[in-house]
Amino acid sequence: MVHTDVLIVGAGPVGLTAAAELRCRGVDCRIIDKLPARLPYAKAVGIQPRTLEIWDRMGLVRAALEAAVPMRGQLIYVNGAEQARIELKLPPDVPYGFAALPQYETERIIEEHLARFGTRIERGTELVSFTQDDDGVLSRLTTSSGEERELRSRFLIGCDGAHSIVRKTLGLTFEGGAFPDEYMLADVEVDWSMPRGYGVRAMHQVDGATDDLLVCIPLPGRSRYRMSMLVPPELSTEGQPDDRDEVAYGLEGGRAPGLEHIQAVLDRLSPQPTTASAMRWSSVFRISHRMVNHYANGRAFVAGDAAHIHPPTGAQGMNTGIQDACNLAWKLALAVAGNAHPRLLGSYDTERRPVGEEVVGRTVRHATAGIQADPADPGTMMLREAQLLVAYRDSPIVGPGTLGQDVPDAGDRAPDCGGLTGSIASFPMRLYDLLRDRGHLLLLYADANAPMAEFHELAAAAGNLTHGQVDACIVLAADADADEAQLPVFRDSRGEFQRVYHAEGPTALLVRPDGYLGARLTPATAPELSAHLAGIFGFGNGMEEGAGQGPASTGAPGAVGQAETLLAALSDHPGRSDKE
């Protein structure tokens, strides 16, 4: 007996994102966390522009923007002298900048969003063990009262951190190592007059080697920062036994730093004389770099810190985990509904593991050699740190595309643009307004010579083949005629869509639920689109049973044949062009 479609272990930002994405797609899920309450710690604080784009699509970005503070740049000091000022600037067509938000606020915002779907965290509940078979996963849980329960689910997602029981039970490796240094974290207020919105990195160096360090990230509140610094000997946990496992990562036990420890570092390294006060919390923590060998095994998956851990350089960890959750959730939703091609869930590992490997490698290099050692030009480096260059062009579930290097192509992030006007609203909209709260969306760009009847056929084919799971709309060039349009129409009044997407002639763009382009078709033809959709949806051929078997499962018997049958039926569409 199935008690829920998906069990999510861990209610941090990654687990909450997975739950919210599943619930908005109608998937029944439960989310558990062994902690009795949300921790009041400002651990992960950096919010990347790509994460804000994801939150925009989810419908919670407004709450995040109201709670966060902007990250405008970083000031770098060496031996008391300013050495560099890094400005966090992005191209003007990127809708969001960099931000800082305490992790507990991030969790609050996503948790409140999740509650709108009637789902709440089951706190004080711990996963003890689980087994899986061809049909699902049987998990054994303990509650805060010590009661043991069994829960049957179709799928399991481990968002349970660096010491993940899900990863260990699956037998996945977690190769890597630990950095020798220990650090202090503290959330304090200071009375300096440093520029607002700028982080501070102050170092003491001897012959180019850093022997003392202070990193300050602004937080919401008056002159409030999350500070990290090397731990003094009296607070070091080095040599103490760790009864959890071999992964030395995260907040450690032992004595927490006092305000005097923080002040001592500020006295040595602060660019201005300052006094720390109002300390909200502090801890000692360790950093490791590790990477899982696979993101899934059967019907169980890992995401976030359960799959990859690395230095906090560039605020990549939590943001990467949130993208893990978004990538997995829409695929699981199709699998639960029985509408997934057998290879679809295997693409989670195929797409996300290379991203995790790149992030781990890059953050380790930055932590050891400094960001200045990055060979990329400043503009490319900034886009990469913002996670706007993550792409899946080599994925088996994307395409066809144009393979243009400077063209948004199949597997790339779908960039935003403005100036889209409708026939009723008197104000222009952004493309991201059209993507909000959507599944797959087929964007049909029509210039003055576009075959409108063929566009209607294309949209009808996509809707029929996927049982209505692909929406469609027309983006109309400023000089094109929309009189024959039978789909929602948005005019590209400023030409931004044409410019951003390099749309030369009639073009079809299929945008996935996670905001990436699944296919780019120029010219747009129903057979090509249908062949691509067959590799995603399976067209209802009872695919759920095989969907959870991982990347080894391939093929969709009968899917292409069904596509051809439906296309043959559509050939009698009264508006079909004789050109085909």
Image: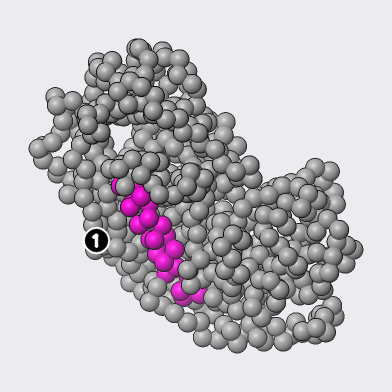
> Looking at the image, which is closer to me, 1 or 64?
64
Q: Is residue 203 visible?
A: yes
Give the x, y percent position of residue 225: 40, 24
Quadrant assignment for the N terminus: bottom left
Is residue 177 shown in magenta?
Answer: no
Give the x, y percent position of residue 340: 52, 71
Is residue 351 shown in magenta?
Answer: yes
Q: Is residue 284 visible?
A: no
Is residue 72 shown above or below 521? above
Give the residue displayed 29% in from the left and 63% down from the top: 293
Q: Secondary structure at mark 1?
A: loop
Number of numbered discs on residues: 1
Give the residue displayed 60% in from the left and 56% down from the top: 414
Give the x, y percent position of residue 515: 57, 56
Left or right, 448 with respect to 71, comes to: right
Quadrant assignment for the C terminus: bottom right
Is residue 165 shown above or below 85? below
Task: Please state which amino acid type lies under the numbered disc 1.
Answer: Thr
Give the residue displayed 77% in from the left and 45% down from the top: 428
Left or right, 39 with respect to 484, comes to: left
| Magenta-highlighted residues | 339-364
Graded by Cα atoms within 10 Å as few (under 14), some (14 to 19) or many (20 or more), the crowding at tag 1 reads some
Is residue 24 shown above or below 441? above
> Looking at the image, which is closer to me, 20 or 153?
20
Q: Which residue is label 1 attached to? A: 173
Name the image quarter holding residue 358. Answer: bottom left
Give the residue displayed 50% in from the left and 49% down from the top: 380
- View extreme (right): residue: 483
